[in-house]
Amino acid sequence: MRQYQRNQWKLIRPCLRAAGIPLECVTIPLHFLSLALRLPDRGEFNRRILLHGTIAINPVKEHGIGSGQIIRRKEDGLFEYHRDDLTIEEPLEIRIGHKTIATTMRTPGQDEELAAGFLVSEGILRMRDQVGGFSRPAEARNRENIITVQLADGVKVKFASAKRFGTISSSCGICGKQSIAAIRQNFPPIASAKDVRIDIATLLSLPPLLRKLQSAFARTGGIHAAGIFDRKGQPRVVREDIGRHNAVDKAIGRAFLEGQLPLHRHILLVSGRASFEIMQKALAAGIPIVASVSAPSTLAMEFARESNQTLVGFLRPPSFNVYSHIERVDLGNWHSAP
C-alpha cells in the first residue's frame, strides 16, 4: 500500500510544481491520488483541482499571520493559484495560578499583555506590583495557548464576579458573564472633563495614523486595531487582534505592565464599532476619550454619559460625531450648519 502511494506521488509532484504549489503545504486525499492515475494528462489533473478544490492547503504560521494557497478567480474569468495571508484565530486560556479565569479567541502574540489587560478590565488587577510574572504550563499539550499570571508574593485578588463560562469569541468580550450586574464593573467615573482636550485637527489625524501602524491589517485585511494616543496625537501603543476587545486589552495591558495606568490624558481609538465593553475597558484604564471609526451602540453612549467619558463615532476624516461630553473636543470657531 505504501509503495502504491509513493508511485502516485511521483506522478502528482510534477503537476503540483507546474501549478506553483509547494509540496510541504499540500494534503491530498487518498481517493484523489488514485484518481490521478486514471487521468489522461497533467492538464486534466490541474483542471480537476481547480474545479473541485480537492487539495487541502496546510497554513504556514508567522507572528499571528497564517498563509495558505488559495484559488483566485481573476477579472478575466481565469483561475490561478495564489498564496494569501490570513489572520490566525486560536484560543487562549487565561489562568491565575491553577484557576482558569477565561478562554478567549485571539490572534497569537502579546499574550502577556492580553492577559494583563483583560484582568485590569475585569477589575481583578489594579496595580503593576500585583503581578509577579507569567508562565506557560510545561505539561500542557497546547502550552502556547495557555498563559498563567503569577501573582506577587502575598497578593490576593477577588475574581468571583469575573468568572466566565464557555469561550469568549473574537467578536464578544462580555460573553459568558453570569449577570448584567457582573458586566457593570465598579469603576469610578472620570473625575474631570478638564484633564484632556483635543482639537479637531489632531482628532482627524488619528485614523490614518492608526491605519499606517496596522502592519497585520496591511497583509490580511481581516484584523482589528486599538491605539492609545496622547492629547497631541502621538501614539503610545498600537495593537492588533482578530477581536477588537482583545486589541484593546493588549494595548491597555502594555500600558499596565509599564506602570502607566491610569491614562487620564490619553485617547483610545478602535478600528471597529464602539460597544459597551470597549467603553468599560477604557474606563478601567482611566481613559477619558474613546473614538471609533464606526458607530457606537446605545449602551455604549449611555455608559459614556454616566461615566463622564467623551465618545466619538464615525471618525472618518473630515467628519465625525460626538455622542457624549463634547467639552473635551476643542471645536475652535464652531458654528452649526444652517
Image: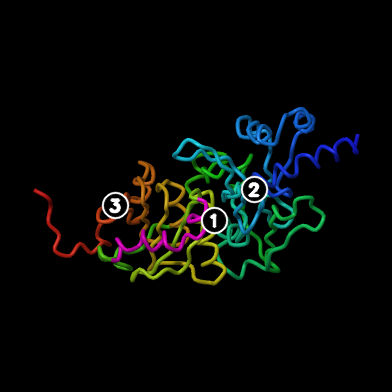
Residue 267 picture quarter:
bottom left
In front of the other: 272 or 163: 272
Q: Which residue is mark 2?
A: 20
Of the residues shown, which amino acid type is indicated by label 2? Answer: Gly
Tell me whether circle 3 and circle 2 mark residues in contact (CB < 8 Å): no
Residue 73: say if magenta. no
Quarter of the image with the N terminus is top right
Q: Main secondary structure of the magenta part?
A: helix
Label 1 SS? loop
Q: What is the magenta range?
A: 202-220
Q: CA distance from mark 3 to mark 2?
A: 55 Å
Nearest to viewer (mark 3 / mark 2):
2
Q: Nearer the viewer, mark 1 or mark 2?
A: 2
As rendered, which of 88 and 10 lies closer to the eye?
A: 10
**Picture quadrant where residue 5 is located:** top right
The residue that disc 3 covers is 324
Name the disc covering residue 75, or none.
none
Q: Is residue 276 left or right of residue 93?
A: left
Look at the numbered discs 1 and 2 and tell me whether their residues touch, using CB distance below 8 Å: no
What amino acid type is highlighted by mark number 3?
A: Ser
Q: Earlier in the sequence, mark 1 or mark 2?
A: 2
Question: Residue at the front extreme?
Answer: 40
Mark 3 residue crowding within 10 angstroms, few (<14) / some (14–19) / many (20+): many
Give the number of the mark in front: 1 or 3.
3
Q: Which residue is mark 1?
A: 123
Q: Identify the residue at horizontal 47%, vertical 61% (top origin).
A: 285
Residue 207 picture location, percent across and down: 36, 58
Kind of residue sitting beneath label 1: Gly
Residue 280: x and y, percent?
45, 52
**In this picture, residue 288 sits left or right of residue 259:** left
Question: For the residue carrying disc 1, how many other residues have a C-alpha within 10 Å: few (<14), some (14-19), or many (20+)?
Answer: some
Image position, residue 171 (x, y; %): 51, 43
